[in-house]
Image (cartoon, rainbow, N blue to C red):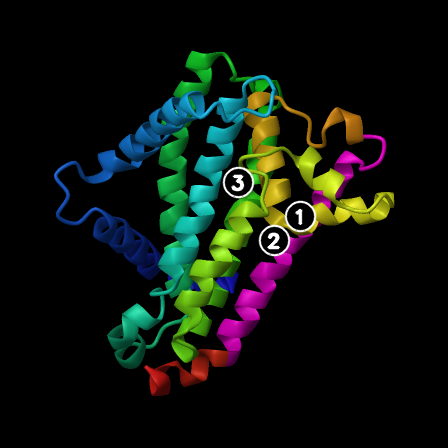
Amino acid sequence: MLEEIKKHGCLMRMLVARNLKIRYKGSALGFFWSLLTPALTIAMYAVFARILKFNNGQAHYLEYLVVGTVAWGFTAGAMNDSLSSIAGNANLVKKVFFPRVILPLSTAAANCVNFALTLVPLLLFLLATGALDLSHAIWILPAFAAHAVLCAGICCLVGTLNVFFRDTQHIVGVGQMAWFFLTPVFYGVSMQLEAFPTAPFLKRLVFLNPMTGVLAMYRRGLMGQALVPEEWAGTVPPASILVSCAVCALVMLAGHWALKAGNRRFGDVL
């Protein structure tokens, strides 16, 4: 797959640029929305978190919430865009020969670029509130890498399924909402761990949700928070984060397998 991407790198770059342009087509502010949208989101959460007193008692809760929300936006955006990554390019699939994997991967790459831009207002917000702690900034790299791999796998898997099963878009809508509430965006990992049985090895199953580990790494890199809450460190070792990384890789493999299996029939179905 990597060789195919390298060989058709020019096409990959063109599709990424096209996806980014389509996102802001007809918009007066254009790419500026990549910075403005997260800034407005942060402001919205700041207001309503104060009004609703939605706080779990932890220090810098608002910042904790915002980091989780911004990171989740990358996942949600990739999942939504992936629905049309192949089905929305029927003419291209039928008339031009090229590795079809480039279509969902270009969608994932475009969302990667958009997410990288959203990190600018996020970093400024964390700096302004005093929550920014880059003493463990190295964790941002594996977080972004695992997140990108996860989103690439999702794009391949969902993009392929939507070609053959048009109900996929409805399933994705419901599944995305369920996944969001099962991910520690609004609440801490401690609440997940408390919900599992007492056996230590069973508690590590919370990291089977790949976004649990990804968010933990982002918060470690941006805010200096522990990968696993200190009160649970003796029961669930920080190395459990590797479970989430492994799931990200498995999703990528599953997506690549699904795309490879359906590749020959794309033209007939579309």
Of the numbered discs 3 and 1, the one sitting upstream in the chain is 3
Q: In this rendered view, identify the residue nearer to me: 47 or 209.
A: 47
The answer to whether residue 6 shows anywhere in this view is no
> Residue 34 falls in which quadrant of the image?
top left
Q: CA distance from mark 1 to mark 2?
A: 6 Å
Tag of residue 248: 2
Extreme residue toward the front, this view: 52
Residue 166 x %, y %: 38, 75
Residue 122 x %, y %: 41, 26
Disc 2: CA contacts within 10 A as few (<14), some (14-19) or many (>=20): many
Of marks 3 and 1, the one in the foreground: 1
Residue 200 x %, y %: 85, 43
Hey, what amino acid is under mark 3?
Phe
Hey, what amino acid is under mark 1?
Ser
User: Which residue is pictured at 29% across the width and 70% down the height?
Assistant: 89
Tag of residue 244: 1
Q: Which residues are magenta?
A: 233-261
Q: Say above or below: 197 vs 44.
A: below
- For label 3, the SS is helix
Left or right of 174, for residue 43: left
User: Which residue is pictured at 79% across the width and 31% down the height?
Assistant: 232
Disc 1: CA contacts within 10 A as few (<14), some (14-19) or many (>=20): many
- For label 1, the SS is helix
Hey, what amino acid is under mark 2?
Cys
In which quadrant of the rendered image does the C terminus lie?
bottom left
Q: CA distance from mark 2 to mark 3?
A: 11 Å
Which residue in the protein does label 3 denote? 144
Left or right of 146, for residue 201: right
